[in-house]
Amino acid sequence: MKTIGILTSGGDAPGMNAAIRAVVRSAIYYDCKVYGINRGYKGLLEEDLIEMDLSSVGDIIHRGGTILKSSRCEEFKTEEGRLKGVKILKKYKIDYLVVIGGDGSFNGAQKLSELGFPAIGIPGTIDNDLAYTDYTIGFDTAMNTIIEAIGKIRDTSSSHERVNIIEVMGRYCGDLALYSGLAGGAETIIVPEVNIEVEEICNKLNATKKRGKRHSIIVLAEGVGNAQDLGKEIVNQTGADLRITVLGHVQRGGSPSAFDRILASKMGVRAVELLLDGKAARVVGVKDNKIIDMEINKALSMKKEFDKDTHEMVKILSR
Ligand code: F6P
């Protein structure tokens, strides 16, 4: 009988629980024993492990967050920390490790594989910043959270004839801003991948104002910089009545969308099947609506391409 360890690491994302459920239930289906490792790599180093059974993952597919908790672990970034981790995994007779998280967590999995410990990654992050996969688990739910917020802010923006900047997460990736801005009908979307001058934003505001449109939504990706500085510049140049909303961690929570639950379930099962097939040091993803897997080294070396065409298209639509 093989034993699989599973952990969630880095920023949590809606759908992580659905992925945990899929890994645990498919592993048990294939006669494996499963250990849940609490609080990511940190919990591993603290030997915070618990054996999981079918009912450990009952009633969680719809829940946000992660029942295994998550953390970012500095100690695991060191060789010493990782060697300690492998020792603990071996102590519990764990044969394989499934890591659900973003690029930082995948780095940990890659390093474990280099030490000869078979690990596999499932992409769980709201940022959608991994180049090898079309979608990461949590992105769709976060996008829906953002468009709900944009809709509400739009109501008051329209009543008060204001300019509203809405800052969204995504780290250095503009996907959350781009697609939620498009779906939310934002007038301007500012992302790290495309340079835009404040003057251009102000010219657009002035032009639409002349046409009688007196409110405007600007979606700003956090990776671009400070919303306060941008707001001040816009007020100086246009005299607009402007408000700023930093959506923050509300974007990380909530019940996962159907899309994220389905994606997480399919990826979880694939991860277990790959490990039992003797394939490790890989990551699972989705490309053209098909579940794929790839060498972790290759996946981490790929550079994410920003969807510039859609960003351009938004300019046509948001006038
Ligand atoms: O990677 C997910 C993410 O939510 C980013 O979008 C954001 O920059 C970061 O995590 C926030 O991290 P923390 O929860 O540690 O403040």
Image: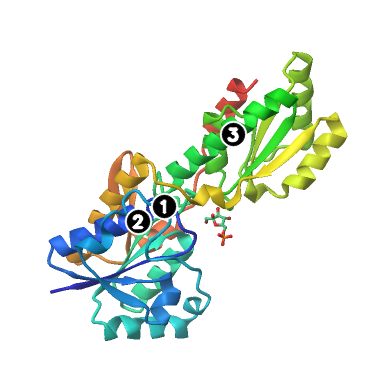
Residue drawn at 35 percent across, 40 percent down? 259
> Where on the picture, by quarter, is residue 312?
top right
Amino acid bearing label 3: Ile
Amino acid bearing label 1: Gly
Whether residue 68 is situated above or below residue 225 in the rendered picture: below
Residue 278 placement, left or right of 82? left
Of the image marks 1 and 3, the number of the one nearer the N terminus: 1
In terms of depth relative to the viewer, which is nearer, 305 or 157? 157
Amino acid bearing label 2: Asn
Residue 125 shows which numbered tag?
A: none
Q: Position of residue 105 (x, y in %)?
A: 44, 65
> Where on the picture, by quarter, is residue 278?
bottom left
Residue that badge 2 annotates = 17
Image quarter in which the C terminus is found: top right
Quadrant containing ligand 1 = bottom right
Mark 1 → mark 3, Cα distance in angstroms: 21 Å
> Where on the picture, by quarter, is residue 196?
top right
Residue 64 shows which numbered tag?
A: 1
Whether residue 247 is situated above or below residue 155 in the rendered picture: below
* Residue 145 appears in the picture as rendered: yes
Residue 81 placement, left or right of 312? left
Residue that badge 3 annotates = 150
Question: Callout 1: 10 Å neighbours few (<14), some, many (20+)?
Answer: many
Of the image marks 3 and 2, the number of the one nearer the N terminus: 2
